[in-house]
Every structure is written in structure tokens, then in C-alpha cells.
Image (spheres, rainbow, N blue to C red):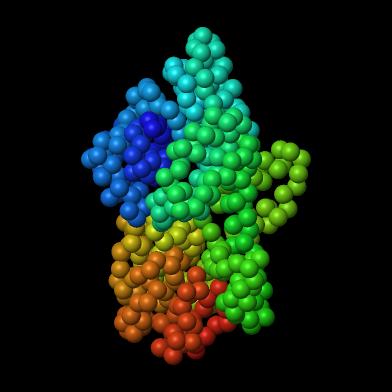
Amino acid sequence: MRICVIGAGYVGLVSAVCFAEMGNRVVCVERDPFRVARLSRGEVPIYEPGLDVSLKAQIANDQLSFSSDLAVGINQAQIIFIAVGTPSGEDGSADLSHVLAVADELGERLDHDCLVVNKSTVPVGTGEQVARRINTALARRQQRARVVLASNPEFLKEGSAVEDFMRPDRVIVGCDEEYGQQLLKRLYAPFLRNHDRLLCMGLRAAEFSKYAANAFLATKISFINEMAGICARLGVDIEDVRRGIGSDKRIGTHFIYAGCGYGGSCFPKDVRALIRTAEHEGIEPGILRAVEARNALQKTLLFQAIREHFNGHLQGRVVALWGLAFKPGTDDLREAPSLVLLDALLNAGARVQACDPAAIDGVAKRYARAVEAGQLSLSDSPYTACQGADAVVLVTEWKQYRQPDFARIRGAMRMPVLFDGRNIYDASQLAEQGFLYRGIGRPVVGSCKASAA
């Protein structure tokens, strides 16, 4: 098929590359000419495992190309995907300005029958709004092209997006016309050969499904984090509780790991947008408000624990921070818990030695003044970060942080104190190696005491 993907951000780029890998001719349209130039050379502007290899291969095979000219992208395209950003507006609702701008431009340029598919995360009713804008412009131009609208929300996980796209656990197709459903069934057939999990539904139902899915996952995370807070007061280990409830098939083991809060481009903004949608309809979204509030609080707990351990005296303390991206496998810093902790530590006068395999450049730009002043140093090595540290704090559970040489780390630190923001370590083993261990919702283990400030 001939496909146009509008938007070369995270979703658009992964979609374009994966569609091309299945033999489709794909043109990815991106307004930024510098980004287009980089992509055309095979340079991936985001960190996503496996994406760079596939991108270069599809460019070499002439299956994938990039352009800043929408007319080039939509020329003879059977399916046009809208994959532009929908960031949070000032009131928390989804900002649809980019989506609607694309709709207006499509209405002014389309001259043939096609299927337009919203892959961006958008509130219920957006597809109908896009269709009206396109068709109004077509009528004004006296253009008889038939344009059908569909919704095809993405469920990609950063860090495994290519694998998720190539082997999806489900594909949701929202379209009120049989033509659109059948065309998307054909497109996705190669991705679903081993299991048919394509779900057809109405346009509005598909739009809402994406928000409901992300809100539910965010709710599971906030629930277990709240249970962890109660466990901490009762002397109960949340890890025991997690295993106890996760064995119940009705609950399951996914997204019930206590930690220092969720971040990223999806959960925070989608929960906010769904809250605003409910308010607009006169419904009080009590659960969603609690989820958002719990997560905001959760991001502050590591700093509270560090401040408590050092009796409020953080001026001049050296803190090693492991992990900056909001999750492993990405360089994405959007809504990352590490930023909340980093801001608090720097404001308290601590000196931070941070490391991350992928997100160093983004943090260096964001905290240029702190880096220049020597209050923040950055590296890709956890051992470098621990040199002379009074405490090490795990924030993002990259694989290389899971089984480090703790004897080497203890020898490099001034004070062997470890704050585990993701509960990935065995507390008793660390205590045996001379560390004081503090997790999330877990008893404090070990006897190392902080020196006087």
C-alpha cells in the first residue's frame, strides 16, 4: 500500500518504519527540515532500541522516505496517518491545534479518495471534528474526493516500541464505515498472522479506549504506591504484598510495582485530559484526581527520605543519582520522577553526580547552569557517579544497574547508603555488604549512620 504518515515524532516515526518493513511504500512528512535531513540520512533523533537499524534498511530498500512537503506525502496515498503531538494545554486538556491544522491542510490539498486515520491520542469526538474540517474544505473547493475517517490508537511502550508494533497484543480500529475497517484490516494483516487480535469498533469508542487504557494502568501504579505508603508505616514489605496480590489472576502482576512515580509522554497528560473531559460532561472524576495526586506525591518521597536520613542537612552532601529517563530503554525525560528529585536536591544545596545510558544530553541542556557551576556532574557510568558519594539513589531501573559490583561501589562512597526507588535490590544482601538500604514501602535494613553535617 501507499501510506503517508504525518509527524516524525515518537509514534509517527515508529509507525512509518514498521509499515515500511512490511513492504508498504511510506512517506513520512515532518515540518522541521533539519529533522527531515537527519532522518533521510538514516539518523534517528530519539533513543529507541532497534529503530535505527530498521530505519536505515527501509531507506536503502526505497520503502521509506521523508519530506517536509505535505503534497509529496499525500500524493496517491491510500491511507494517511495523523501522528502529531497532542500536548497538555494550560488547563490540562489535550491541545488539538496540531491535529486540526493538519486537517485544514488536508482539506486544502486532497484530490483523491483515501482513508485518514488519527493515530494521535485525541479526546472523543476529535475524529468527527477532523472529518468536518476536511470535508468542508473539499466542498469549498468543489472537490469530490471521498475521505473516510478512522481512529487507530497506538499502544507502544517506549523501550520496546518496535517489538510492540511488529507483534501487537491488539490493534484497535475505530471506523463507522466498512470501507475503512476493511482497508486497515488489510494493512495490519501481516502483523497479526499468529493471532488475530484486531478489534473493530466505532470511531468514538476507539478514541476513548486509548484514554481508558492509560488511565487504568496509571491507576494500578498509584494504587500500589499508596499501599506501599501504608506498608511503610506498618512495618510490612510491599514486595511481599505485591507477590501476594499479583498471584490473583483478576489482578495480575503487571503495573503493581511500587516505585517513585510514573512519568513519560502518555500517562500524565492522558490522565489530565480525561479529567478535563469528565468535567466538561459534568462528571466528577474522583478516582482520576486521586491517581494524579498520588503520583505527584510519589515523586517527592525519595527526596523526603534522603532529607530525613541526613536530618535535613543536605548542603554539601554528594548524592549519586542512577537513572534520569522516565523509564529504561528511552531517553525521554518528559514528566520523569528524576527531575523532581534533581530539582529538590539542587535547591537544598546538595551536589549531584548523575548517570544514565541515554538521557545525559537532555539533562545537560535542562540543567546547564548547575553543570557549569559544578553542582551537577553527568556521566554514563554508575561507578563514576558513586565516587565520594554520601548516598546513591536508584531512580530508573536500567539493566546495567541491576547487578553492579556493590563491593566496588561501597569502597568508592563516603557513606554506603542506598535509596532504591524501584525496589529492585535484595535488602538483606545489601545490608550484609555494609549498606543501609531504604526502598519504597519496605522496612529500612542495615545500620549505617550518616555523619554529622
Question: Which quadrant does the N terminus fall into?
Answer: top left
Residue nearest the viewer, comparing 170 with 110: 170
Residue displayed at 59% across by 41% down: 200
Q: Position of residue 405 (x, y in %)?
A: 33, 80
Res. 30 visible in picture:
no
How many numbered dots are placed on residues in this image?
0
Q: Tell me if residue 166 comes above or below residue 2 in the rendering.
A: below
Residue nearest the viewer, comparing 223 with 93: 223
Residue nearest the viewer, comparing 195 with 203: 195
Q: Tell me if residue 429 comes above or below residue 261 in the rendering.
A: below
Q: Position of residue 111 (x, y in %)?
A: 44, 16
Q: Tell me if residue 397 comes above or below residue 139 in the rendering.
A: below
Q: Horizontally, is 69 left or right of 84 in the view?
A: left
Residue nearest the viewer, comparing 166 with 381: 166
Q: Position of residue 125 (x, y in %)?
A: 63, 33
Res. 214 visible in picture:
yes
Outermost residue on the top side: it is: 142
Q: Position of residue 78 (x, y in %)?
A: 43, 28
Residue displayed at 41% across by 61% down: 328
Residue displayed at 60% across by 27% down: 129
Residue displayed at 63% across by 68% down: 249
